């Protein structure tokens, strides 16, 4: 009996010490995995811990406007999930209600009861993964980690928040189609526009990072086989102030003219820098999308805006002079055609007028006039168009520019009607940017510039490459021809089809255009059945051009003529750019030259307002604290009072300029959308509401 007791006693000791040794071994292995230094973990001969390499994408570069304001950036988001099975029962029962209240307060998509029911049901069914929210910002992620239960971490609180995704975010949507990415119906992302053209620059170089397998899964280490190289930033030629005006004016006119879609481009004359580009499609409910870059990809007959090229060719060849007399009867019949060509006032006609007057009034008498001069030598006319840069693409960096279509002698489409119809902008097809290029070249005294959309590449804030203006042709024709057509373009605005659009502040030069659009079969229908495109192309100020601009509006229903439809947008853009651009105005060098009446002052950033007033010689009082101000004034006294900004609460931005309002709200984490021009009169998020980073704020501006 005693032997049996001794045996059982020794057996118990053996089992006990075996368990102790086993626990020590497990503890040692765990500590060696978790705490051993890098050399022991990743030494050449150490194979104890499973490891592998994974691809690590580089941080994508940002797209900035010419003043370095971000237009497109990469924002990191996180998918938030929970493993309710790891939470202690007592903790779960005590804190689940508080956790649910916190989730509801942060996300505002479910009630606390709905969150609690969701988590309880998944726990009851032994689910180890419950998706709570997708695309959560890092700030929201930090808030979640402070909530009851989640504050215990992943192992005890069940919070799973390490699934990171990066999303390209357009901070301003007014030139989205030009900026980049397109997502098709299958969800596949295609890089287009600037992102497509400069993808390699923006994307950087991916790296390879070592991960190790621990008890909680694969974890990233600090070891790289190759470190990722972040992408560079692109500084565009886009001027956000001009872009806002262009976008809002086009949107407004598409609604007023009941038009299908349209585009506007503004280019800097001397450099070819594209300062604004907008492409909008209107839907029946007056909402807008940017499904296509009409400005560089829609090739149509330009109509009367092409008369500039026809006149230039005849002047350059000495076949016409501006004071030559033509008979503008209003109705023109060509051999081989069953349909006459009419002027818009064909019932009365213009009678005998000069070539210059015919151009200014956009009379189609240009067609028979040019035909008479070139019908026996059509190659000479085509060669002049080639000399002007009309027959070739501009070679811009962006994908999608269509090659111009120009009828040529000896081809199947050439006929006895080709010269007269080309003279007025048919049997020729261009994209709007190509039409604008000719007008910009005239404004630049015959020097043809390549349109540019990017002016710098930057890495870590330093310029690594600059894109200087590119001259495509030093001179497309004689200065004499340039001077003559400039005179005609100015005449269009003074006594011709654009006379109602003349600015009261400065002279503009340009040409109206109305063209039929072919139907789906490739035919031009009768007047009452056709759709039209209305265009206006020109430059301003006429005497010293700084900007050229084209406006094209497709399928307007209220009116079809270029002056009323597109010229209105051109004039509005020109006037607003003029009003907001100091280079158009004489500087005030002496205090005595300024008005005795104090100027209109918008609310905004204190140092900017104060510096401007001091520079202009206006005395003013300002509050010493705070960066943002309100303003008040009498006829002779200006006071700048402090506008308090609480970074946790939505500020009042009414009265501010778009630039100040956007800067302030984006610094607080909001996404801002702007409509209109002038100062802020409405904000969609009320003053005093808690700041929610990533929330959309819509601002309405009015002069």
Image: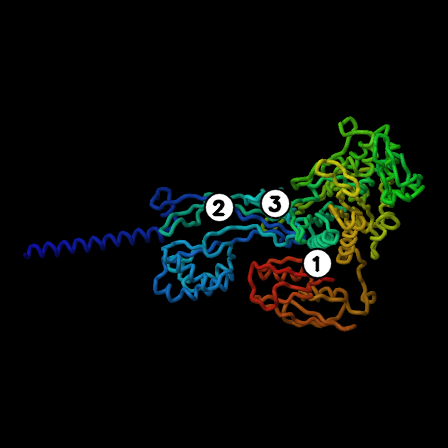
**In terms of secondary structure, where does tag 2 sit?**
strand
Residue 675 spot, x, y in % from top left: 68, 58
Between residues 128 and 457, which one lies in front from this camera angle?
128
Residue 527 spot, x, y in % from top left: 79, 42
Residue 278 spot, x, y in % from top left: 69, 49
Going by the image, does 456 lie left or right of 354?
left
Identified at 73% across, 64% down, the residue is 612
| Marks 3, 2: nearer the viewer | 3
- Vertical arrangement, residue 37 with respect to residue 634, above or below: above
Going by the image, does 29 lie left or right of 221?
left
Q: Quadrant of the C terminus?
A: bottom right
Instruction: Name the residue tied to disc 2.
Output: 56
**Disc number at residue 676?**
1
Q: Quadrant of the N terminus?
A: bottom left
**Disc number at residue 193?**
none
Residue 435 spot, x, y in % from top left: 76, 42
Residue 441 at least partly seen: no
- Vertical arrangement, residue 547 with respect to residue 370, above or below: below
**Disc number at residue 195?**
3
**In terms of secondary structure, where does tag 3 sit?**
helix
- Vertical arrangement, residue 444 with respect to residue 243, above or below: above
Contact, mark 1 vs mark 3 (Cβ under 8 Å): no
Identified at 87% across, 40% down, the residue is 480
Disc 3 from disc 2: Cα separation: 20 Å
Going by the image, does 390 lie left or right of 399?
right
Disc 1 from disc 3: Cα separation: 27 Å
């Amino acid at each position: 009996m005693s032997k049996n007791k001794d045996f059982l006693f020794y057996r118990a000791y053996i089992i006990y010490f075996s368990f102790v040794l086993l626990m020590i071994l497990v503890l040692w292995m765990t500590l060696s995995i978790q705490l051993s230094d890098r050399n022991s973990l990743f030494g050449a001969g150490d194979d104890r811990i499973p490891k592998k390499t994974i691809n690590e994408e580089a941080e994508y570069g940002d797209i900035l406007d010419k003043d370095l304001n971000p237009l497109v950036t990469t924002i990191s988001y996180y998918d938030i999930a929970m493993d309710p099975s790891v939470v202690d029962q007592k903790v779960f029962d005590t804190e689940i209600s508080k956790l649910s209240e916190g989730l509801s307060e942060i996300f505002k998509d479910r009630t606390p009861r709905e969150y609690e029911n969701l988590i309880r049901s998944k726990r009851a069914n032994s689910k180890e993964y419950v998706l709570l929210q997708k695309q959560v910002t890092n700030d929201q992620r930090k808030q979640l980690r402070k909530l009851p239960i989640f504050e215990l971490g992943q192992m005890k609180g069940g919070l799973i928040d390490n699934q990171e995704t990066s999303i390209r975010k357009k901070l301003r949507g007014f030139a989205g189609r030009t900026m980049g990415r397109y997502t098709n119906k299958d969800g596949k992302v295609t890089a287009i526009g600037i992102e497509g053209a400069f993808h390699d620059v923006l994307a950087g170089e991916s790296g390879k990072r070592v991960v190790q397998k621990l008890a909680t899964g694969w974890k990233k280490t600090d070891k790289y086989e190759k470190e990722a190289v972040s992408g560079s930033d692109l500084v565009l030629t886009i001027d956000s102030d001009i872009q806002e005006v262009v976008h809002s004016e086009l949107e407004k006119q598409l609604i007023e003219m009941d038009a299908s879609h349209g585009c506007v481009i503004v280019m800097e004359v001397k450099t070819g820098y594209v300062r604004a580009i907008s492409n909008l499609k209107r839907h029946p409910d007056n909402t807008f999308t940017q499904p296509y870059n009409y400005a560089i990809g829609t090739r149509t007959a330009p109509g009367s805006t092409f008369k500039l090229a026809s006149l230039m060719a005849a002047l350059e060849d000495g076949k016409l002079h501006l004071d030559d007399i033509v008979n503008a009867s209003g109705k023109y019949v060509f051999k081989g055609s069953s349909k006459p060509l009419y002027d818009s006032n064909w019932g009365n006609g213009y009678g005998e007028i000069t070539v210059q007057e015919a151009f200014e009034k956009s009379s189609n008498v240009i067609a028979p006039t040019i035909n008479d001069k070139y019908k026996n030598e059509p190659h000479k006319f085509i060669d002049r168009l080639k000399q002007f840069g009309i027959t070739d693409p501009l070679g811009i960096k962006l994908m999608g520019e269509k090659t111009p279509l120009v009828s040529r002698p000896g081809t199947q489409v050439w006929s006895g009607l080709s010269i007269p119809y080309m003279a007025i902008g048919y049997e020729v097809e261009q994209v709007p940017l190509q039409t604008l290029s000719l007008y910009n070249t005239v404004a630049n005294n015959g020097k043809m510039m390549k349109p540019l959309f990017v002016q710098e590449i930057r890495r870590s804030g330093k310029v690594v490459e600059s894109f200087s203006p590119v001259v495509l042709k030093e001179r497309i024709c004689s200065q004499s021809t340039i001077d003559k057509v400039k005179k005609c373009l100015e005449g269009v605005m003074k006594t011709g089809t654009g006379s109602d659009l003349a600015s009261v502040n400065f002279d503009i030069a340009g040409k109206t255009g109305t063209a039929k659009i072919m139907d789906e079969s490739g035919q031009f229908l009768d007047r009452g059945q056709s759709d039209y495109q209305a265009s206006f192309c020109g430059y301003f100020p006429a005497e010293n051009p700084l900007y050229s601009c084209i406006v094209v509006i497709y399928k307007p229903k209220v009116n079809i003529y270029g002056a009323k439809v597109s010229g209105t947008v051109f004039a509005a853009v020109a006037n607003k750019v003029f009003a907001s651009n100091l280079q158009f105005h004489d500087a005030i060098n002496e205090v005595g030259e300024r008005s005795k009446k104090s100027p209109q002052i918008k609310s905004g950033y204190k140092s900017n307002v104060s510096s401007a007033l001091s520079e202009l010689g206006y005395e003013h009082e300002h509050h010493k604290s705070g960066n943002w101000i309100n303003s008040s004034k009498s006829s002779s006294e200006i006071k700048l009072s402090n506008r308090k900004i609480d970074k946790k609460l939505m500020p009042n931005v009414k009265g501010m300029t778009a630039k100040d309002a956007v800067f302030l709200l984006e610094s607080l984490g909001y996404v801002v959308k702007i409509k209109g021009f002038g100062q802020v009169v409405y904000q969609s998020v009320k003053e005093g509401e808690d700041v929610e980073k990533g929330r959309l704020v819509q601002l309405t501006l009015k002069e």
